Amino acid sequence: MLITVIAVVATLVISVLVSVIATNTYHKKVADQKIGSAEERARKIIDEALKSAEDTKREKLLEVKEESLRTRNDLDKEVRERRAEVQRSERRVQQKEENVEKRSDAIEKREAGLNAREEALTKKSADVAKLNEQRLQELEKISGLTSEQAKEYLLKIVEDDVKHESALMIKNMESEAKEEADKRAKEIVVNAIQRCSADHVSETTISVVQLPNDEMKGRIIGREGRNIRTLETMTGVDLIIDDTPEAVVISGFDPIRREVARIALEKLIVDGRIHPARIEEMVEKAQKEVAAKIKEEGENAALEAGVHGLHPEIIKLLGKMKFRTSYGQNALKHSVEVAQLCGLMASELGLDVRVAKRAGLLHDIGKSVDHEMEGSHIQLGVDICKKYKESAVIINAVESHHGDVEPTSLIAVLVQAADTISAARPGARRETLETYTTRLKQLEDITNSFKGVDHSFAIQAGREVRVMVVPDQVSDADMVIMAHDISKKIEAEMEYPGQIKVNVIRESRATDYAK
């Protein structure tokens, strides 16, 4: 049994070995076949690659030969063109050289001619100098003057003539400049007046309060007049109760007090309880209302004039001017109008419109306190502007608007002009007939008091006076001095709004008869 197993195992081993050997032999044969076919394909690929490389090489060589041929043709063409250009340049240079030689020959000939002329001129100059010397010697003998003395004499004559002509020219230019300036100034003023429209309301020194019935008069007077005395004492005005039906007249020169009294009396009439305690209460309320109204009027005026950034105290002072008048013209309305006129004229002249309006609005600010403090409204206005840190331009405009000091800026001059326009325009200010006639008579009396005056006339409502003088007693030069003296005397002895123009007229006549 064991032998049988061994025999089987041996058989199996031998069969395995035979199969392995056979398999290896087969695989080797297959590998050899594959290697042989791969080598053959490789040889074919290499042959094809070599053949393709040869073809590519031949094509590239042909392309290079063609490109070199084209390049050589282009170079040959460019060389031919360059040679042609060089030949043309050589011909041009040759022509220029020929022209230069011709010009050089012509210049040499011209220089030779000029040298000959210079020699001739030099000879002639020497002859002329000799002749001039002989002429000067003869002139010196004849005139008795040396050449230097004659030169000084001629120069003096020429200098005098030039000075005279220069003076005439300067005078003509000054006249033309003044005429043009006057014309331009009139245009600016007229345009400003046309563009600025302002209402003028004549103020009075009394206010009238209407009563519901005449029985109210007795209640206002009170027992033994205690009510009316209390009201007059607290407001500082006079109450006039007369036969005028259903009306009470409040009289006083302070418009603010008069306004307080009017408001208080109207409140008492509406309330119906009229006794001293109630009167005191209503007067206090009226004072508060007037203070609020003053502030409101100041703000409205600044807004209307287009002026911003004013100190609150200046706003209050402006509001007080609502209750101030000058020759019947409301001071606040006047200030607003001056501000508008200044702004319009400043815009025409290219100046700062805001500063001009501010100066115009504040020029009469002193009138708001001139009835409470000592001093003129000009000085008070300057003090107010300095106190509230206004600029130097504004202060000078306030200080100079009536000519007390010299203006230092064009803004100050505009304020003067606008103030005069606002005060002098028709309807702005009013005067009583007696004051008006007295002023005209005084004006004529002042002018007639001067020596050499024949007669004088006050015209244009006292805005101008024409003075006729005796020609034999007053010369043209004296006229200028007389006009100045008359103006100064009018300023010193009269009070008047605006300005007065003084015209001194001298007329000479020569008469003869043909027979």
Image: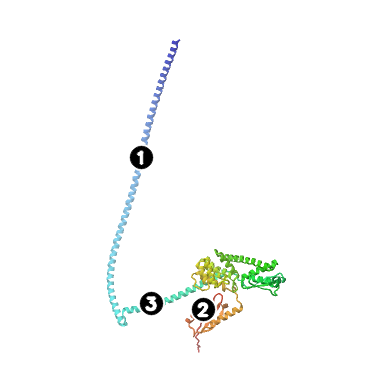
Quarter occupied by residue 230? bottom right
Label 3 or label 2, whichever lies nearer to me, is: 2
Dot 2 falls on a residue whose secondary structure is: helix
- The correct choice, above or below, for 452 with respect to 423 in the image is below
- Check the picture and name the quadrant holding the N terminus: top left
Residue sitting at x 34%, y 49%: 78
| Disc 3 residue type (three-letter) | Glu
In the picture provided, is 106 more to the left or to the right than 384?
left
Quarter occupied by residue 257? bottom right
In the picture provided, is 470 more to the left or to the right than 158?
right
| Residue identifier under label 1 | 62
| Residue identifier under label 2 | 488
Residue sitting at x 29%, y 62%: 104
- The correct choice, above or below, for 457 with respect to 43 in the image is below
| Residue identifier under label 3 | 159
| Disc 2 residue type (three-letter) | Lys
Front residue of 38/98: it is 38
| Disc 1 residue type (three-letter) | Leu
The alpha-carbon separation of the residues under discs 1 and 3 comes to: 102 Å
Front residue of 64/256: it is 256
Q: Earlier in the sequence, mark 3 or mark 2?
A: 3
Q: Earlier in the sequence, mark 1 or mark 2?
A: 1
Q: Residues within 10 Å of mark 2 (few under 14, many from 20)?
A: few
Instruction: Give percent across and percent down for residue 447.
Output: 53, 81
Label 1 or label 3, whichever lies nearer to me, is: 3
